[in-house]
Structures are given as structure tokens and as C-alpha cells.
């Protein structure tokens, strides 16, 4: 699976957004049939990573850049919401199968983060109960926060639809997993419904 080509940070957002429309952000229903990795054209730059203050499922503050992204480790980011009855349960259950493959790497060399796109309802307590349903282990955080901050993160990573109506419809959100190593400037993406072994191999390439 090829990784994202290196490029200056100034062009990262523009290229990533353009590429996002053809790398799987077309709705949940097609993901099982297209669960192959789909690299973007350019890695996000530092400006694409707002240092937004989020809260994890334990109510602990987490800075998006400082605590999740920055450093020589891999972070894998997905977007979910607890009321989702379609793709979210399937993707979370599939990612849970990656946990035993990662072993002690989880939370160290590889960090998992699932960010709510319904922060008005997804409180830390709700996310804690939701994540517990799937046997989520330490090293995988479920995060909520201010909607404006989450939107900045989502768009900075290119996880949105250019059609405003589709983008506002939570049921149409993507099941892609964006992952990378910020220190090495390596970023890619894969369907969160891909084979767990394949996801594991992608997440450990740069850790």
C-alpha cells in the first residue's frame, strides 16, 4: 500500500481536500466493497492540525496536536457518533480486532482516536459506555469537544464531502481511517472495514 507523497505543508490542505472526494468519502454503503487502502495526494502539514482541546471518554482533557499527533508514533483517527446504527458499529467492531494484533504497541507506538461528529449528544459518559460495548482498551480514546473544533480537525484531515447537504448528514459520513506519523511526514488512509491484519500492517509500518 503506497504512502502519501511528501509535499510542502502550504499545499497539504488543498491537495488533501481535492483528493478526499475520490478516496472513499462517498458514503458508508460502498465501503465494504472497496475496503482497499486509498492514499491521498499529499500529507497534511502542521497548519492542518489544530491544537484543539477535546475530552476523552474518561473526561480527561486531550490536546489534539500535542497529545495525539505530535511525535514519532502513529496516530489513527476515525470519526463516529454513538447514535449511529449503520457503519459506526461495524467499523468500531472491526478496529477492535486490531487491538490484540498491536499488543503492547497500542497507546505507545500506535495511538487510536475516534472523534465524535455529534458532540452535542456524545458526552464523555456516553462515549465511555459506547466504547465499552466493543472492549476498547487503553491506548484507544473516544473524544468529544466543541463542534467548531471537531469540524476544523475533520476538514484539516480531508474527511468531508464537498456537497454541503451530504456533509451535514451524519448518516453519510465516511468510514475511513486516517493514519500517519507526524514526525516522519507519512500519512495515508484505509477503510476501517478492511481486513484487520491489513490495517495492522499499515499502522505499524512507521512505528
Image (cartoon, rainbow, N blue to C red):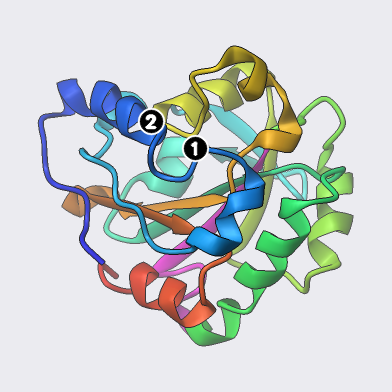
Please state the extent of the stretch shown in magenta in the rendering.
104-116
Using the rendered view, name the quadrant where residue 98 is placed.
Answer: bottom right
Using the rendered view, name the quadrant where residue 16 is placed.
Answer: top left
**Label 1 Cα crowd, 10 Å radius (few <14 / some 14-19 / many 20+):** many
Residue sitting at 17 percent across and 28 percent down? 9
The correct choice, above or below, for 198 with respect to 125 in the image is: below
The residue tagged 1 is: 64
Circle nearer the N terminus (1, 2): 2
Residue sitting at 49 percent across and 59 percent down? 34
The kind of secondary structure element at disc 2 is: loop
Residue 105 belongs to the span the image colors magenta = yes
Is 172 left or right of 201, judged from the image as shown?
right
Residue 186 belongs to the span the image colors magenta = no
Is 157 left or right of 152, judged from the image as shown?
left
Residue sitting at 85 percent across and 50 percent down? 85
Residue 49's disc number = 2
Q: Tags 1 and 2 in contact by the CB under 8 Å rule?
A: yes
**Marker count (numbered):** 2
The image position of residue 1, as x and y in percent, is 26, 67
The kind of secondary structure element at disc 1 is: helix
Amino acid at each position: 500500500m503506497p504512502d502519501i507523497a511528501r509535499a510542502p505543508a502550504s499545499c497539504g490542505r488543498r491537495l488533501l481536500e481535492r483528493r478526499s472526494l475520490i478516496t472513499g468519502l462517498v458514503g458508508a454503503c460502498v465501503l465494504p466493497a472497496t475496503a482497499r487502502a486509498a492514499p491521498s495526494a499529499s500529507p497534511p502539514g502542521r497548519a492542518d492540525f489544530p491544537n484543539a482541546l477535546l475530552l476523552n471518554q474518561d473526561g480527561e482533557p486531550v490536546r489534539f496536536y500535542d497529545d495525539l499527533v505530535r511525535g514519532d508514533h502513529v496516530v489513527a483517527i476515525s470519526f463516529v457518533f454513538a447514535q449511529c446504527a449503520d457503519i459506526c458499529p461495524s467499523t468500531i467492531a472491526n478496529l477492535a480486532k486490531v487491538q490484540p494484533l498491536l499488543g503492547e504497541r497500542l497507546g505507545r507506538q500506535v495511538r487510536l482516536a475516534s472523534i465524535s461528529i455529534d458532540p452535542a449528544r456524545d458526552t464523555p459518559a456516553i462515549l465511555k459506555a459506547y466504547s465499552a460495548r466493543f472492549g476498547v482498551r487503553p491506548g484507544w480514546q473516544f473524544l468529544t469537544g466543541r463542534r467548531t473544533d471537531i469540524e476544523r480537525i475533520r476538514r484539516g484531515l480531508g474527511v468531508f464531502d464537498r456537497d454541503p447537504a451530504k456533509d451535514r448528514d451524519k448518516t453519510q459520513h465516511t468510514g475511513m481511517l486516517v493514519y500517519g506519523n507526524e514526525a516522519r511526514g507519512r500519512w495515508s488512509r484505509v477503510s476501517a472495514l478492511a481486513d484487520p491484519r491489513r490495517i495492522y500492517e499499515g499502522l505499524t509500518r512507521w512505528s
